[in-house]
Structures are given as structure tokens and as C-alpha cells.
Image: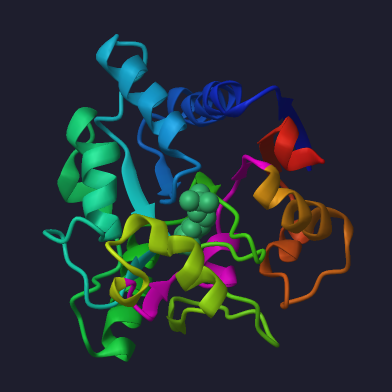
Amino acid sequence: MKFIKCKDYDEMSIRAAEVLEAVVKEKPDCVLGLATGSTPVGMYSRLIEDCKAGKIDFSKCTSVNLDEYVGLGEKDDQSYRYFMNTNLFDHINIDKAKTFVPNGLESNADKACSDYEAILEKTGPQDIQVLGLGENGHIAFNEPETYFPKLTHRVDLTESTIEANARFFENQDKVPRHAYSMGIGSIFRAKKILLLASGAKKAKALKEALNGPIDPKLPASILQLHPDVVVVCDEAAMQ
Ligand code: GLP
């Protein structure tokens, strides 16, 4: 595990973009595993800037996202597909037909999950997988559990996640209660993992995940077992 400790959010975003861009430069047709949440937004802005300046080319890349809310589609401004389009895909030269997010509008959970696993199978392993960190230690929407879910599955979001994510919605009642999420096995196929953490709210989960026992009650703790993890975080998250 490699640590890149940054002064603040802006530096974290720049350093994280460097790690991701290095993968794209080495393998222009790479598979990018992408994440939502407020943490990677600064990194995405940097990728947009660099792409517009001609420093990086995403035209041959494929992307797969970690998760999506059940019931929300591309047109919902709270969906993760909408988030990815507006925060990244609409502004870089990636082929949108090669960007994948679980289908939140598929109400048959088994179908939604097996369809997404089939897509992951087809794209092949992520060359790099970006991860944020939930305040309760979740990665993607793998919530604290008694086991590590392996593949894409339907998740019941915990109250703490619903509360934490309510800031993006009109009110807490509007936050979907379920999501489709890659499992730990789907995430672990990635050749490299880029874990981002910013702010004091993440400090406890980050410390316990990286130093404590590997425990599904703190899903991010499993990252200790992955052979190539780069943690890019700011000082506040490292306390
Ligand atoms: C959501 C996402 C996660 C993300 C987490 C943290 O629950 N499903 O992938 O890592 O939020 O979000 P933020 O970066 O806004 O703190």
C-alpha cells in the first residue's frame, strides 16, 4: 500500500489525477473504474482541464462505475449516471457508449446485477479503480455487514449512509433506500486501486480500515489484502 499525503483537498485532487492519468498514458485503451461522491469531483475537474489542454486522451478508454441508486435513471439529477455525465463524461473525449453504470431503472434486482456483471466480464478487469470512503467505512455501496459481498448486488442502504447522502437531495425522504453496487470481488478484479479520502469526517474510518483488523463491519478494511492500493488523502483525513 502506498500513501500520498496531501496538504488539502486541492492537492489531493491533483495528485489523484496524476495517478489515474499515468495509467491512461501507459495503456490508452484501459478500463477505468470510477466512483461518485463529492471526494473525486476535484480530481474529475483536473482530468477535464488536462483533457481540454490536450495533455490526456480518453478516446480509447472504457469506464465502469461502482454503483447506482435503485429507481433513478439518467435523467434524474441525483442518479450516479447523471453525476458522471455532468462531472466528467460530458467534458472529456471519452466515448459515452463505452461508459457503464448499473441500470438503476431495472427493477428486477437479479437481472440488474447479472447484467452488470456481464458488462464487467466483457470490459475485462479495471486497470485502475477509484474509490471514495463512506463515513462508516463503506466502499462503493458495500455497507457494514457480516460478510463481504462478492459480486454486484442490491444493497439496503444504512441509515447513516442515507443521512450522509441526504445533503445531495431535497430532503432525507427523497434519498433512495436501495442501490446496486459492485461487490468486493468485482472491485478486487482491479489491477490498481486509488482510494481517496478528504476531511476529518473520514479520519476514523480511514485509520481503522488501514490499520485495524479486516472485518466486513468496516468494508474498506479488505483493501489491506489488495496487492496495489494507492491512498491519496489530505491531512484532515489522516488524523
Ligand atoms: C456514496 C458512494 C461511495 C462514496 C461515498 C462517499 O455512498 N456510493 O462510492 O465513496 O458516498 O461520498 P463522499 O465522497 O461524498 O464523502
Give the tally of numbered discs.
0
Quadrant (top left, top right, bottom left, bottom right) of the C terminus = top right
Its colouring scheme is rainbow
Quadrant (top left, top right, bottom left, bottom right) of the N terminus = top right
34 magenta-colored = no
Residue located 59% across and 21% down the image: 11
Q: Is residue 208 left or right of residue 12?
A: right
Q: Is residue 34 left or right of residue 81?
A: right
183 magenta-colored = yes
**Residue 152 drawn at (x, y percent):** 44, 76
**Residue 143 drawn at (x, y percent):** 58, 75
Q: Residue furthest right?
A: 212
Looking at the picture, does residue 47 appear above or below residue 233?
Answer: above
Q: Is residue 16 left or right of residue 231?
A: left
Q: Is residue 30 visible?
A: yes
**Residue 214 drawn at (x, y percent):** 82, 69
Looking at the picture, does residue 70 appear above or below residue 239?
Answer: below
Q: Is residue 141 visible?
A: no
Q: Residue furthest left?
A: 75
Residue located 45% across and 45% down the image: 38
Residue 226 quadrant: bottom right
Residue located 59% across and 48% down the image: 191
**Residue 78 drawn at (x, y percent):** 25, 59
Which segment is the magenta one? 175-199
Residue located 21% across and 70% down the image: 72
